[in-house]
Image (cartoon, coloured by chain):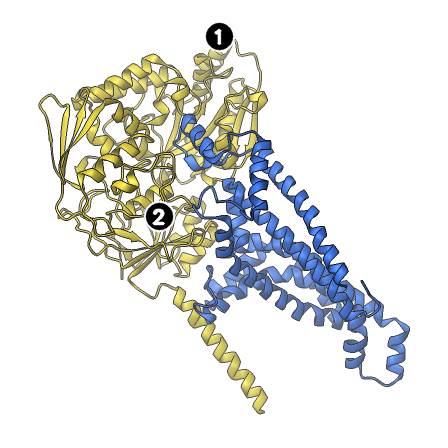
Chain colours: A yellow, B blue
Amino acid sequence: MNSTAMKRRTFGILSTGALMAAAGTTRAADKKVLRFVQNGNMSILDPIWTTAYVTRTHGYFIYDTLFAMDANNAIKPQMVDKYEVSPDRTQWTFTLRDGLEWHDGKPVTSADCIPSIKRWGARDAMGLKLMEFVKDFKVVNDKTFTMILKEPYGLVLESLGKPSSNVPFMMPERIAKTDPFKQIDSQIGSGPFIYVNAESKPGEKHVYVKNTKYKPRNEPPSGLSGGKVVKMDRVEIIEMPDPQQQVNAILAGEIDLIEQPPHDLLPIMKADKGMQLVDWNPLGQQFIYRFNHTQPPFNNPKIRRAALLAVRQEDYLKATVGEPQFYKVSSAAFISGTPNAFEAPDGFLVKPNYEKARALLKEAGYDGSPVVLMQSTTLPVLTNTAPVTKAALEQVGFKVDMQTMDWQTLVSRRTKKDPPSQGGWNIFHTFTVAADILNPISNTYMVAQGEKSWFGWPTDPEMEKLRDAYSKEVDPAKAKELAHAVQNRAIETAQYGWIGQWYGPGAARKNVTGWIKAPVPVMWNIEKA
Amino acid sequence: MIDFIARRLVAIIPVLAVVAIFVFLMLRLTPGDPAAVIAGDNATSDQIDLIRAKLGLDLPIWQQFIIWIGDILRGNLGESFFFKKTVVELIAQRLQPTLALSICTLIIAVATAVPLGVLAAYRHGSLLDRVVMGFSVMGFSLPTFVIGYCLIYVFAIDLDWLPVQGYTRIEVDFWGFISHIILPSITLGIIYVALIARITRASVLEVLNEDYIRTARAKGLSNRVVLMRHALRNAAVPILTVIGIGVALLIGGAVVTETVYGLPGLGRLTVEAVLSRDFPTIQAVILMFSVVYVVINLLIDISYTLFDPRIRY
């Protein structure tokens, strides 16, 4: 072999080796670094300004909450050490735990918590309701404050321990005093992780390091409550939009966790010995069937009811999720298996009744004008919901104009109150994290205050009376009865449809353990072997 | 020549004005509301209206346009609706991966396609010619994402030689940078190789039938000298033209390639901005791409004079 050939060969070997070594460094060689891919990119870092779930999850990294929901859906103190309620239930006094500190080293005080609650209370549906009852806040001392109510409110703890968007995260006073409709510009919290602004690049990755000064509670972790013990030095949220690439990357060991891969890719990971599927969100999600109450024909309750009588939940679940192990047929609006769950009689939404639907449609005088059904094709789990609705509606005599669009167009168009022929709409589908809809107050879809309601704008004073009664009820047994009454009212007026619960497991490398079961993917307690 | 360059640079202004008006109107007149996207799924109409007002999207379109154009003329491209960063900062952050991808793709494409095209022309009608042309057809026909997934399966998952996704900045780790950029560049390069090889073959083939080539051969010059000095140089103008036109192809291809390989570049920024209706970012990125396209074509026009002395401006 001449010298040139030898040089070429040596270069080839060296460069291949160097490239492979470089590839290996990406492979999470460091056991103290966790790489996690969320369901979507995170561009907004203010969990009060947006209800986006990716931002909510970011909130759990860097902020802490006064109360939190445990694995049994009970609300437990988190930043709060103890609390007292006055005999007339109008004064709630909260005392913070010892040793709580912001990431900049300053102590967490009552003066921080009050504006944090107020800012959240100006944006979140449950927060708004709570603030209707709040007369005033009073600082007792640095660690103790009192919330004074106008009258007893049954959901004080449920509100302050609300698990999902918007979560009442505590922020330092100067940040919490930001206009609720303006994004905050600082990422200082008192949570178990610290956000590393200098290393985070939106669209590429977000970097968090362990907050070594964080003092976890002594109890073991349970849901979102208990001791938040961080076992990794660093967590990186990697932004990777393509689900197929997420799976390729985890199979190659470049990332450690995927929040929720699409169901059709689960068999690939099931078949790999280095992988495990983790059911981290046992409450799952629920599909929603939403009418526009302000436009014909669905301004007529009989016609709404006719449409819902054509629903068979299993059709939706088979078309979207596929495998029965990942879905549950249930006519309970407030999530099967939780305290307010109530299986509706007559197989409502479970067994269709086409004859009754056709009769109702005739009785209501449906004029045959086409119903505009919006179909989103960019969120894979939602794509097949609209075609199932179209088939069901046509089965009972509706004319359906299914219009296909991307999700962002749909979320813009659903705000329009114009007639469907002028850019409005009649029906769309979405889904919600089950933890968001466990009671009649947090369940946005139950709100029936017209213009103030969620898209579709139902108006029903009777429903509002029931919701109001629920919010004031302090006896759990009576509150449960009222929750059932709310569900019955929603069925009676066909306010909206809940068309199936489903579950999407997370994917993790086999060497990753400790992923906590909760409604939010949280990264404390996780370790890597 | 200086006159020509000055005239062309001045001509950029109306081009950008047309692009600016077109992009602005297109974004405002097509469906999509950034306020609804920002507010998230659980927000109510009232909350969305408040966000819309904060962003100035409740103003009449003509008023929004005047504000935007005024900002542009003052050199202010605006702030992203989502990222709490100026658009200039965002573009600067995302520039390197796209630049690296484009340069590596161009190097791979030119280094592969020109020799292949020349050889195919020289061996016109041979098996080699047919293989090169067959490859060209395949390169044009296969979508970029299919090529990407196939290469990932072979080189990243099966052979485990290269990473599946991601990007390492060149100043952080050179070999890491190379390992991350190779597969995306090859993926994007294949369609480019197909295009350039085909044009090179056609141009060289045409030149090879010219009298001066016969004369060069008659003078006893070697095939290498005839091909490289006489044939290729005279065939260079169409090849350069297609490279210039291909820049548009490169920009479009970068969007798909960056998404498939998880490269945090301008292509992905564009897709993210379009999906979230981040108007300031979309407008700035499209304006920037327009400037790049016009400038590259100007450089190509200037380079013609290097290869063909008859061309004068």
Callout 2 amino acid: Gly
Question: CA separation, marks 2 and 1?
Answer: 47 Å
Q: Residue at x 67, y 64 (%)?
A: B193
User: Residue beneath label 1, please?
Assistant: A363
Rendered image quadrant of residue A122? top left
Asked if residue B195 can be seen in this view, the reply is no
Q: Residue furthest left?
A: A87
x and y percent of residue A184 in the render? 35, 42
Q: Secondary structure at mark 1?
A: helix
x and y percent of residue B64 in the render? 56, 34
Residue A292 drawn above or below residue A122: above
* Image mark for residue A449: none
Q: Residue furthest front?
A: B74
Residue A471 shown left or right of residue A272 in the figure? left
Callout 1 amino acid: Glu
Q: Earlier in the sequence, mark 2 or mark 1?
A: 1
Q: Quadrant of the C terminus of chain B?
A: bottom right
**Circle 2/circle 1 CB separation < 8 Å:** no
Classify mark 1: residues with Cα within 10 Å, few (<14), some (14-19) or many (20+). few
Q: Secondary structure at mark 2?
A: strand
Asked if residue A481 can be seen in this view, the reply is yes
Residue B58 shown left or right of residue B144 in the figure? left
Residue B4 drawn above or below residue B171: above
Subunit of mark 1?
A
Q: Quadrant of the N terminus of chain B?
A: bottom right
User: Residue beneath label 2, please?
Assistant: A506
